[in-house]
Amino acid sequence: MTVLGGCSKPAEEPASEATEAPAAEKQAVELQVFAANSLSKALDEVQALYAEKNPEVAFADTQYKASGELVEMLKAGSSADIFISASKGKMDDASEAGLIDEGTRFDMFVNDLVMVTSADNTDIPEGLTLEEAVSGDYTICVGDESVPAGNYACQSLATVGAYSDASGKGGEFVGAVADKVVLDTSVGNVCKHAESGDVDIAFVFSSDVYRFGGVKVLSTIPADTHKPIVYPAAVTAAAAQAEAAKAFLDWAANDPEALVIWQKWGFELA
């Protein structure tokens, strides 16, 4: 019996090794994230930290674009595991098109809308009001309709009679600023217009000031002039790595080290 016992052990060990190898291979996953432009620097850091703590997880080239453009990419069949929008409305569009797992959706961040100017501009007083901004004395830059920050800006401008549609979309600039507004396709580009002095004032998220620098805040736009600024996140309906995507989002919204990174870049968890 001793001999039989001795023979049985070598037979078991290779079988154990054979079953363990595939399990280890299955742990390796790559997540594809689609995220609003304004998240780029913060999310890059958060992803790097997560990959350091979870070596089996890697991130594909994260797509940072205007939220509306990301929705169109998903509609066209682009693959992603996670979508983080800078606008509730854009996430609603994705939901209505069946592009996200609605059960995984949650509000991840809140943000403020601010007016900025070049860091070395001393001609515009701090504390500038919306009414003063649309007096016709200044040139302005806002994001186009695909850019959530632009939608919020137009909502605010509508409250002082400078934009014709209170929804922040589909209208036109009117009054003294009718010919003084420049549109651009990303909030980053909008911020750069102010930094370079191409325009006097730009409407951006407060987190963009941390992200780009080169500008100073003139004032925070009153929150009651636009819809609440929230960043919803969700796992996509066609996610190839749904469970891993859920795990990452949960960690990113709750881990103390991740929270330090978000706060460093001006984001406040919802």
Image: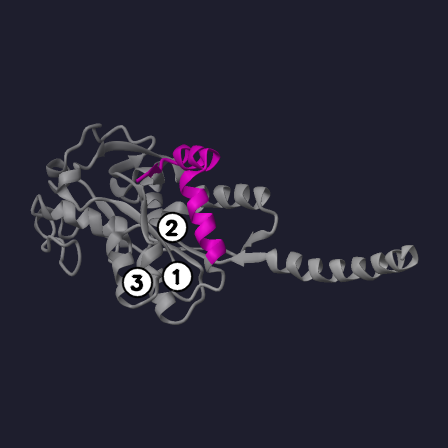
Q: Quadrant of residue 12?
A: bottom right
Q: Amino acid at mark 3?
A: Ala
Q: How far apart are the two marked residues, 1 and 3, measured between alpha carbons?
A: 9 Å
Residue furthest toward the right? Answer: 3
Secondary element at tag 3 = helix
Residue 94 locus on image (x, y percent): 30, 62
Residue at image location 39% in from the left, 33% down from the top: 263
| Residue topped by disc 2 | 37
Secondary element at tag 1 = loop
Give the number of the mark in front: 2 or 1. 1
Q: Amino acid at mark 1?
A: Thr
Badge 2: residue crowd in 10 Å (few <14, some 14–19, many ≥20):
many
Res. 137 in view: no
Residue at image location 24% in from the left, 56% down from the top: 89
Residue 165 located within the stretch drawn in magenta: no
Tag on residue 236?
1
Residue range in magenta is: 243-270
Residue 265 located within the stretch drawn in magenta: yes
The quadrant of the picture occupied by the C terminus is: top left
What secondary structure prevails in the magenta region? Answer: helix
Q: How far apart are the two marked residues, 2 and 1, measured between alpha carbons?
A: 18 Å
